[in-house]
Image: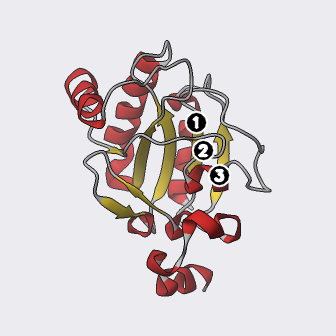
Amino acid sequence: FAVLLILAVGSQAFNQEAAWPAAVSLHQFHAADIHGRDISLSNYAGNVVLIVNVASKCGLTENNYKQLVQLDEKYYEKGLRILAFPANQFANQEPDTNEEIYRFVTEKFNVRFDMFSKIGVNGPNAHPLYKWLEHRPNLPQGDVEWNFAKFLINKDGIPVGRYDPHTEPLDIEEDIVTELES
């Protein structure tokens, strides 16, 4: 019932800048994709979602992108959606423009999952989605520690897992499968 109510209200009625603390689901938020189009995250209702803050010039870049692509290829048809949010808050490791980031990940890693525009993940300029994710009572709270922190979201848009940047994507495959099968 709650999911239907959220979908009925829609993300357009939700002021994410001011009301993010009251959000109950990922599906209430929206964000600009890497090409600048506003995307309602309600588009992901019914899918398991893995949200990752990414960077192109980090020591974790190679393994994370390769493994995210593996997960995407293996589980996309089963309902997994990966949402990558470039962020430049950690040692200036994502200094490129959205266009340069997109070209890099598609040419080097053959990324096909959804890439979003560069955002802030911590502090006063953090995107409301990240403010919300960092304050979920059922998960470890606080700022994202570094590039490639991961949040697992269930089909109803509820965060069910938070993983530190050194947890590789394939290390959470079992949790992803559990959510896909529920």
Task: Note whether 4 is above or below 72 in the view shown.
Answer: below
* Residue under the point 25% across and 48% down: 35
Up/down of 28 relative to 163, above or below: below
Amino acid beneath label 1: Ile
Q: Residue at x 55, y 27 (%)?
A: 147
Quadrant of the rendering where the N terminus is positioned:
bottom right
Considering only vertical position in the picture, is 76 above or below 56? below
Disc 1 vs disc 2: Cβ atoms closer than 8 Å?
yes
Front of the two marks 1 and 3 = 3
Amino acid type, label 2: Asp
User: In this rendering, does residue 90 appear at all?
Assistant: yes
Q: Which residue is mark 3?
A: 131
**Among all residues in the image, which is located at the extreme top?**
59
SS class, disc 2: helix
Q: Position of residue 76 (x, y in %)?
A: 34, 49
Q: Nearer the viewer, mark 2 or mark 3?
A: 3
Residue 175: assigned label = 2
Coordinates of residue 181 in the picture (x, y in percent): 52, 58
- Write down the quadrant of residue 6 in the picture: bottom right
- The amino acid at mark 3 is Lys
Q: Which residue is mark 1?
A: 172
Could you say which is closer to the camera, residue 17 or residue 3? Answer: 17
